[in-house]
Amino acid sequence: MASDHTRSAILAAAERLYADRGFGDVTLRDIVAEANVNLAAVNYHFGSKDELIAELFVTRSIQTNRERLNELKAAEEAGGGRAAIEDIMRALVGPTLRGCLGPDREGSTAARFMIRASIESVPPIRRIKNREVDHLRKFAAAMRRAMPGRDDTELYWGLHFALAMAHHTIREKERLLRLSEGKCDLDDVRAIIDRVVTVSVMALTMGDVPNKPAARPVLVHGRLTRQDL
């Protein structure tokens, strides 16, 4: 088996097994048997199980992030260099949700692998997520251009919460279906994206949260004065 073909066979077998059974239950020997290669080939191409998981996750993440950045670029070009905050949020969460939800996608090996990666926070994936944030900085910069008066901290929290909503929806879709008794349509991906975008934009545009609660009115002889009303 040629070297490139061997590498591809290992990646394809590992992705199938991880998607089906999870990271903890799959051993290198399982992958070797599935790919019809020897253990030395896995060690030669990847070095370890962690490196193999990392390779798969990076490959899928690059595809998603490229789609995100392409949509962001198109939105900014359409807006003359400044995209609407709604379009920025849509570019951020749309590719992830479209990639993992819907009858035409969620059954694919790639989607099931990424759902598994979202549910099972194994060390190699955590390290990559914590390290690879450059594409998110581009979104933060676009948000800054769209909302020039907004505090950076609020923008970062807004970005973080938008991603959290998208990933939680993917992870907990079965729970939501049960809770809503089927009323929430997890096959209508466009509507799901619209909901996440709407809530994200509302959180960013509703105004500043007061730093402290308003002072209580002072009682004069146990009653409110006219000025307190």
Image (cartoon, rainbow, N blue to C red):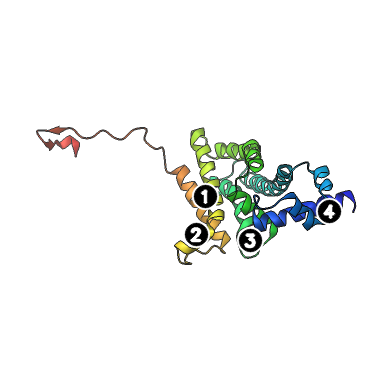
Disc 1 from disc 2: Cα separation: 14 Å
The residue that appears at 61% across and 62% down in the rendered structure is 102
Mark 1 vs mark 3, foreground winner is: 3
Mark 4 vs mark 1, foreground winner is: 4
Q: Which mark is residue 106?
A: 3
Q: Position of residue 189 (x, y in %)?
A: 57, 60
Mark 1 vs mark 2, foreground winner is: 2
Q: Indicate the amino acid at tag 1.
A: Met
Packing grade of label 1 (10 A; few <14, some 14-19, many >=20) is: some
Q: Position of residue 73 (x, y in %)?
A: 66, 44
Which residue bears the numbered disc 1? 165
Can you say which quadrant of the picture contains the C terminus? top left
Can you say which quadrant of the picture contains the N terminus? bottom right
Under circle 1, the secondary element is helix
Under circle 3, the secondary element is loop
Give residue 223's quadrant in the image: top left
* 1 or 2: tag closer to the N-terminus: 1
Q: Position of residue 196 (x, y in %)?
A: 52, 52
Disc 2 from disc 4: Cα separation: 39 Å
Give residue 130's quadrant in the image: top right
User: Mark 3–mark 4 contact, CB under 8 Å?
Assistant: no
Q: What count of labels does the image hold? A: 4
Disc 1 from disc 3: Cα separation: 18 Å
Which residue bears the numbered disc 2? 175
Q: Indicate the amino acid at tag 3.
A: Glu
> 225 or 95, which lies in front?
95
The residue that appears at 70% across and 56% down in the rendered structure is 17
- 227 vs 48, left or right, is left
* 2 or 4: tag closer to the N-terminus: 4
Q: Indicate the amino acid at tag 2.
A: Arg
Packing grade of label 2 (10 A; few <14, some 14-19, many >=20) is: few
